[in-house]
Image (cartoon, rainbow, N blue to C red):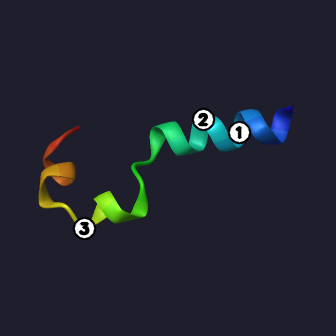
Amino acid sequence: DGLLAGLLQGGARQPPPERLSDPEVHRVP
């Protein structure tokens, strides 16, 4: 559960790699 929780939290905090290339993502805090 700890690993799953960490992955879920980490994924929720960080946007998907495909969105990292979007300039709009950098504007959003």
Residue 9: give its label. 2
Outermost residue toward the right?
1
Residue designated by label 3: 21
Q: Residue, x 30% and y 58% (percent of image)?
A: 19
Quadrant location, the N terminus: top right
At which x and y percent is residue 8?
63, 37
At which x and y percent is residue 22?
19, 61
Residue type of the residue flagged with mark 3: Ser
Answer with mark 3 or mark 1, whichever residue precedes in sequence: 1
Number of numbered discs present? 3
Spatial CA span between label 3 and label 1: 24 Å
Q: Residue, x 23% and y 38% (percent of image)?
A: 29
Residue designated by label 1: 6
Answer with mark 3 or mark 2, whichever residue precedes in sequence: 2
Q: Residue, x 60% and y 35% (percent of image)?
A: 9
Spatial CA span between label 3 and label 2: 21 Å
Q: Are marks 1 and 2 in contact (CB under 8 Å)?
A: yes
Q: Residue, x 13% and y 60% (percent of image)?
A: 23
Residue 29: give its label. none
Q: Are marks 3 and 1 in contact (CB under 8 Å)?
A: no
Q: Where 28 falls versus 24 (above or below)?
A: above
Q: Where 24 falls versus 10 (above or below)?
A: below
Question: Is 22 left or right of 20, judged from the image as shown?
Answer: left
For disc 3, the neighbor class at 10 Å (few under 14, some 14 to 19, many from 20) is few
Outermost residue toward the bottom?
21
Per the image, label 3 sits on a secondary structure element best described as loop
Spatial CA span between label 1 and label 2: 5 Å
- Toward which corner of the image does residue 11 lie, by quadrant? top right
